[in-house]
Image: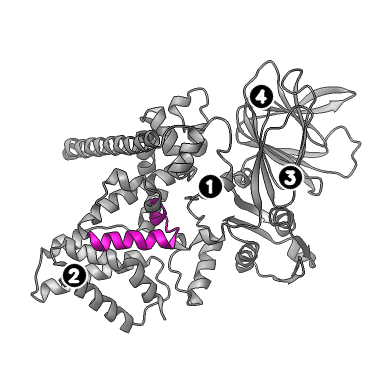
Amino acid sequence: MGPADSWYTNYKARLFAIACHFGYTTEEAEDIVHQFFLDLLQKNLSDAIKNPEAYLVTAFKRRLIDLHRAGKRKENVLDIENFYLPSAQDIIEQLETDEVLTNRIAEAYKKLPARYRQVIYMKYYQGYSTEKIVSLTGFTHQTVYNNLSKGIQHLRQHLKKERLLTKLAHFIFLPFI
Amino acid sequence: MIYTVEELAINDSFIAWCTGQNEADISFWNDYLQQHPEQLLTLEEARKIVLGLTFMLQKKQHELSADSFQPKHGLYVVPGKTHTDPFTKEHPVKFPRRKKVWVAAAAVILLLGAGVGFLYQHPMHQNSAVTSAPAALSVPAPGDNIRSKNGEYKTLILADGTKVTLNAQSELSVSDGFGTKDRNVRLTGEGFFEVAHNRQLPFIVQVAKYKIKAVGTKFNVKAYSNDTYSETSLLEGKVQILVTNGGQDQVYKTLQVNQKFVLNDSTTAETTQPKKQEVVPLSYDDANQNIETAWVDHFLAFDNTSLAEIKNVLERKYNTAIVIANNDVAQYRYTASFQNENIDEVLKALQLSYPFSYKKDGTKIIITK
């Protein structure tokens, strides 16, 4: 029994999806993932791996690059190398350290109409289920659902627009600095 | 069925998968990904939104809610009941605090070969059946007397709309003329007050040695009779500390936001003027969680706190008796925060940063060197 067992249960789907993303068929992808975990079991894994999700994704990308080099090619090596899929822990660490990012989310949230903010606050800050929000607010299930869904949709739009503007700003100003 | 980003982000089971909370949800979404590998990036985006929103709302809770006059631009706060009530949460999606103690604890867990890889995946929820009883919501009438037992929290909505969260083993008495003649309450123990605004009738909390006067604000009062100190922490608005001198209330100190008034009790109850008092800044931990009011959100937070003080907090929260048999150990100081851990886990985590031993003797816990 090693950590690899629980890793297999928790992350095999993710690695499988990554292989599919790079053009392998589902059968091929399944084989690659199985072989990858079999090889992992042979290894003396360090107990100090604190972020197994990130570790596995990186190791798996290397496996895909090796396969590519061995001639069973699918996709470009650079594409695989540049494919960045942050683990949940990476995301949280980024949120913790990157003030700008948190502020961007906060700005987008503040732009939402109050009816969207209310349900989003209840779901993500207070951790209430949709049913619970229905019983607390007295709105119908459909209303709560719509407000949540529209709220997220607007939030995404705000964030996208902003990302675009930032990129644009970099594009315009960078050459002059 | 194929889910869109929006559908995923608001799906309770998906949220549980993002925060690694529930085995059934985790395996459901892993299966979904296995069935629909092409949905990987959609899942990824939804996960970023869930984690991003959850994290942002927690980090900004003080900052955004501070602006009570422009509620439209602030963090949305639900009017009325139950909103900060930690026990009614069906899916606590809080991030586990990632403090030094936890890193150490996790290191040990890893060494034990338990295979628990990373902290946030540690299934915190499994201990959510904390020894405390669920919080009761009550609406006390003027003249009522509300008491919480050990291990019990209570959320009260007073007649004027003021919300009081009562910590374990505390008592709040509401004056007979509350809401009409005055807004006076008397507190023993600890309470977090979110006072409804009313300039005409100031809200006054009376504790053993002084009074706190507010018109509309948020503050925490800790005045347990078995603690050697009492403190009033101000989060929003303004409060005044009043002392009674010759039958007259006098303004003794006016607190600014993010300050607290600490009174180190001398045993003489007759002294009208507090002896060792000071006004100090509030403490925030690494995750910007306010230490003084952490208990309202069901966090246990200690900031350079002696084990003797921690003992009092643990006794109330976990409804147990703790004896520290060694004076040196009682003076050990700890900085740590916990959520949803049971008392064994708390003590074990503390042991890691400054070792001591403890054993359970019936209902008592005995701590030795």
Rendered-image quadrant of the C terminus of chain A: top left
| Picture coordinates of residue A101, whole percent (x, y) | 35, 43
In front: mark 1 or mark 2?
1
Q: Distance between the residues labelled 3 and 2?
A: 58 Å
**Residue at left offset 56%, top offset 60%:** B127
Q: Mark 4 points at which residue?
A: B160
Q: Mark 3 points at which residue?
A: B148
Q: Can residue B358 be seen in this view?
A: yes
Residue B35 included in the magenta stretch of the image: yes
Are discs 1 and 2 located on one and the same chain? no
Are discs 3 and 2 located on one and the same chain? no
Within 10 Å of disc 2 (Cα), the crowding (few <14, some 14-19, many 20+) is: many
Q: What stretch is highlighted in magenta?
A: B15-36
Q: Residue A29 carries which label?
A: 2
Q: Which chain carries label 2?
A: A
Residue type at tag 1: Lys
